[in-house]
Image: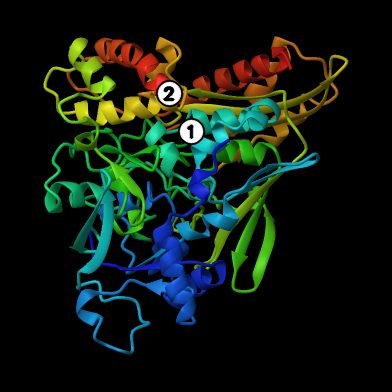
Amino acid sequence: MRPFSYQRATDPGMAVQALSAAAAANNPLTQANAQPLAGGTTLIDLMKLDVMRPAAIVDINPLARGWSAIDPGADNLRLGALAKMSDVAAHDQIQRSYPVIANSLKLAASAQLRNMATLGGNVMQRTRCSYFRDVSYENCNKRNPGSGCAAMDGVNRMHAVLGTSDQCIATYPGDFAQALIALDATVEITGRSGTRGMPFAELHKAPGNTPEIETALQPGELISAFVIPGRWPRSVYLKARDRQSYEFALSSAAVALDVQDGTIRDARVALGGVATVPWRAREAEALLRGQRFDDGLAQRVADTAFADAKGRQYNSFKIALGKRVVARALQQAATMEI
Amino acid sequence: MSNASGSPPSGFHRRAFIAGAAGSALVPMTARAATQDASAPAPQDPALPIDVTLRVNGQDKRLSLDARTTVLDALREHLKLTGSKKGCDHGQCGACTVLIGDRRVVSCLTLALAAEGQEITTIEGLATNDRLHPMQQAFVDNDAFQCGYCTPGQIMSAIACVKEGHAGTDADIREYMSGNICRCAAYPNIVAAVKQAAPEIMKG
């Protein structure tokens, strides 16, 4: 690991100032000189791999005093960005009113990592693309913009089939983000000019021609909270993976339904493990609204969700798998007892 | 619902107070060699060691560390507490699991500086006098290891697993112990050990 200076920020203003001061104007956030340290489960790992090379670490854990509340209100749910994954996953009201959130967190990582990792850090985690994580591969447009993509014709079994570009096919690895994008969450961002809200769906950027730019956050900005409108007791997070536990998704689906008298009033479908960013399947979910649920409808939704998918040599199986995951998640949501 | 993670340990408050008194809420860590320099508030020189006090198994340990030092390396290389094992060093295998406060964490991804002021419990801190902790005894009784390399991490993780209330069924134990890899595949015996120790640990 390269040397860095370590600073502890004890209030948000000073954290923002320290992160801004060290930032070179033309660096994307992923390559900013100063990086915030929360749980450290991505940052310290990638620093050991020499993938991230910050000259300054700003420890924001002391901000947890104000930024870690779990606050289920009558009309919405507010989650502090420094709340730990394990605390949110174990919260009674979240398990009851937002099972898609509780299960997306419970099915991620290990108990140890969930005790360390925060919600804000979780949505900012970097891809698990093996060519990105191994600096002995020179060709990675995320690490070395313009260098090419070793995954394109490499062993790309784990890579994305949706939201890809000819520059990058790295999968967004997280689970929680699919629940957030499905439920129309807002992300609260604290920066130099105060706090602003942004639709969570606008936070992550598809790779396009700039895979090194992963989010809309600028150096000096921090996620301080997430706000989820409404309540979604009829919701499911289904995750298919190579092992039963402690593994990233090959394909996952976050599904939420509002069913009244047998008719679907509102429906949300988001996909994980198959796309470069948290992925909302808007056209597919629209097929459900106003309908009565049956297995044929679930299949049409699944087909529509993957209509634009592009497989490569080793990952085309994700299209068939992903459709089955969507259909099964819809069946589970439609039939769950609430 | 515990919100313990939201309450920074006393060390942070003390430093915050000192920083507040100095008119800044950002706390540059004081490099040992720089303490004589009165014009201090720049970030510390990464090349200089930093004084830090870690509380390990109930004792305060004063150390002078490179900022890059993880809790695992502080334990093994500086405090000679070699029970916690370095397997992958990337948070994937669980061999380095320790308790910080009442939470199990991987010490290989935890910076020592960020753990200052918090109670760290390692495998060396479990036994009292000559009496093994119930989870240690259960691992012996159930032959819950072969080579033993993962065992300290398994035992620390298992204690937390029980206290979290995640040891009710075999399926729960397997799910909530999945962050501890055993290359000898002693898993069935590990599950049996956790089940044996759970009632005694819950009794206190």
What residue is disc 1 on?
Answer: A273
Task: Answer with left or right where residue A170 lies relative to residue B108.
Answer: right
Residue B56 shows up from this direction = yes
Kind of residue sitting beneath label 1: Gly
Quadrant including the C terminus of chain A: top right
- Mark 1–mark 2 distance (CA, rounded to whole Å): 9 Å
Left or right: B195 in relation to A219: left
Residue A238 at what x, y percent from top left?
Answer: 56, 23
The subunit letter for the residue under badge 2 reads A
Placement of A335 over or under B91, stated as above or below: above
The quarter of the rendered structure image containing the N terminus of chain A is bottom left
Q: Where is residue A174 in the image (x, y as percent from the top left)?
A: 49, 39
Q: Which residue lies furthest to the front in this view?
A: B129
Determine the residue positioned at 34% across, 65% down.
A54
Q: Residue at x 55, y 32 (%)?
A: A89
Q: Which amino acid does label 2 sit on?
A: Arg
Q: Residue furthest right?
A: A261
In the image, what residue occupies the spot 20% across and 73% down? Answer: B48
Under tag 1, what secondary structure? loop
Q: Residues within 10 Å of mark 1 (few under 14, many from 20)?
A: many
- The answer to whether residue A245 of the structure is visible from this angle is no
Which quadrant would residue B200 be assigned to in this image?
A: top left
**Label whose residue precedes the other's in the sequence (1 or 2):** 2
- SS for callout 2: loop
Rendering coords of residue A135 (x, y %): 25, 52
Kindly check if marks 1 and 2 are in contact, taking CB atoms under 8 A apart as contact: yes
Which sits in the foreground, A285 or B126?
B126
Which residue corresponds to mark 2? A241
